[in-house]
Image (spheres, coloured by chain):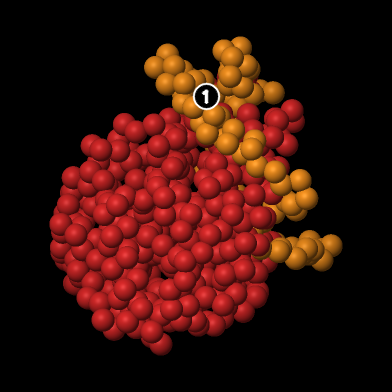
Amino acid sequence: MEKDEFERLLKTARIELDEEEYSLIEKDINQILRFFDRLENVSLEDEELAFHPVEIPEKLRKDSTETRDGIENIFYNGENYRFYFLGPKI
Amino acid sequence: MTGKFLSLNDAEYAVFVSQLRQANERLNAFNFIDENKKSGKIISVKDNICVKGMPATASSKILQGYTPGFNATAIQRLEDNGFSVIGKTNMDEFGFGSFGLNSEHPAKNPFNEEYVAGGSSSGSAVATALIKEHVSIAESTGGSISAPAAFCGVVGLTPTYGAISRYGLIDYASSLDKIGFIGKSADNIREVMEKTVGSDPKDTTSLSTAISNKNSHKLYVIDNLMGGIDEGIKDRFEELLVRLSTKDYKIEHVKIDYLEYSVPAYYILSMSEASTNLAKYQGFKYGFKVKDFSLNYNDFFMSARKQFGREAKRRVILGTFIRSKSIKQKYYEKALAIRHAIIARMKNFLKDGFIIMPSMPIFTPKISEVSDISPVEAYSMDMLTVPPNLCGFPHMSFPYFYERGMPLGAQIITDHFNDYSLLDFLSEWEIGFKYKFKEEIG
């Protein structure tokens, strides 16, 4: 992976690295991608894709309101003001 | 069959907690120990599973200060059946590791503190070895139950994917995560499992399929998986097969295609899923808070995510890359196809027998021997635990030998929803096997 592509990726992932981490992780990522490239030799054209290891039947809930966690639980840990989370500007 | 669990009166509990705290100073098994007296059967819980009123950090600085106001479904079901949680166990951050070292205070092996405890459920395995009649509620994504169980001389059972609700589990990779158990008796693990399995309206991937125990005396050994295993481990494993054949087990050597691709396929899927699951940590809703609301959204978010450890950052970056539209087919879809191919091929054998293999390809390493290995070397150590985890097959690591004072574990795999056959196998194994522990409290 080229440096400018790595920089773009960091922005997309919203990860900021210090100098030491930058050089280590950039090197690691290239090694790991070479490890993943082993899959290039595998031919599996007709194979289905297993999104889950077992079949998960479709489950739909009734179209009705229900009470789940109380509002106190939802705001239990967040910075909040009058039942609104406090967050950054968008 | 009913298990036997530690249950203490008020005076005994105070002494027990004091002993546990002393042991924890050496072994770092727990991130949190509850001082409040317990009236039920004592269990511990991995720190990525929510217990109402107890901190849940998944050993990450980004979750420091997070205390859930609810129980995970598995924990609620256990509390409703007379179990009490003593505390939250140490782990690799978010489950990212095989040795327990991706934690600020890594857990140490209870047989020898210079050695790793294994990961990511490091603290659950140490707590189980340390506490009498104990079961710890753990979690596995790619081997996080089998690896520490093998290194710490205890039993680790990873159930079929979907058998136990993931509601209240701090996600790593949603198509791979499974809540499971680390214990030291078949009866104890069975009792805890019976109380937790079953569908849950709060987790749409949880299943109501009945768990069976179709037993078999046929054991398949996958020859093409044995290549990368330490010669000493292979020798001990051969001795285990001889012992099992004297107990009327029939051993058959087979080859299963595509298994050599299971580790890269697993890491591609797990990193992709982790990068989306960890996007929720933004610095204002859970745990670590960024207090500077004058920052714009991107700077706020990036500033919070500095709290991730190095392995978490590595996996989020790689997962984000793998999910990009232009290369999705090259990595992600290929990995899904490999998972499908391996499931079909393993099922061919699991329909009439178990698959058996060592749990780990190496003897328990010293902390100093693995603290500086490269990520690819570390990931490759999962070569035996990844196949059943990638495919959601129930599997169990059990101790079978002690060499130079350290335990060795073997892993047995069965078909989806046949989990109880693993415990029947263990009950039979326990007849001629004596677990060894350096110290036990309680």
Between residues B38 and B382, which one lies in front from this camera angle?
A: B382
Which quadrant of the structure image shows residue B18? bottom left
Q: Is residue B56 above or below residue A14?
A: below
Q: Position of residue A17 (x, y in %)?
A: 47, 19
* Residue B376 in view in this figure: yes
Between residues B62 and B408, which one lies in front from this camera angle?
A: B408
Taking the spot 59% from the left edge, 51% from the top edge, the residue there is B258
Task: Find the residue positioned furthest to the bottom.
Answer: B1
Q: Position of residue A28 (x, y in %)?
A: 46, 26
Q: Is residue A42 above or below residue B72?
A: above
Indicate the colour of chain B. Answer: red
Q: Position of residue A12 (x, y in %)?
A: 64, 24
Taking the spot 38% from the left edge, 84% from the top edge, the residue there is B248
The chain coloured orange is: A
Taking the spot 59% from the left edge, 24% from the top edge, the residue there is A14
Amino acid type of the residue that numbered disc 1 sits on in the rendered structure: Asn
Taking the spot 36% from the left edge, 54% from the top edge, the residue there is B360
Give the quarter of the figure containing the C terminus of chain B.
bottom left
Helix, strand or loop under label 1: helix
Q: Is residue B54 above or below residue B36?
A: above
| Residue, disc 1 | A30
Q: Position of residue B353 (x, y in %)?
A: 52, 75
Q: How many marks?
A: 1
* Residue B419 in view in this figure: no
Between residues B184 and B34, which one lies in front from this camera angle?
A: B184
Give the quarter of the figure containing the N terminus of chain B.
bottom left
> Around disc 1, counting alpha carbons within 10 Å, would you say few (fewer than 14), some (14 to 19), or many (20 or more)?
some
Q: Chain of mark 1?
A: A
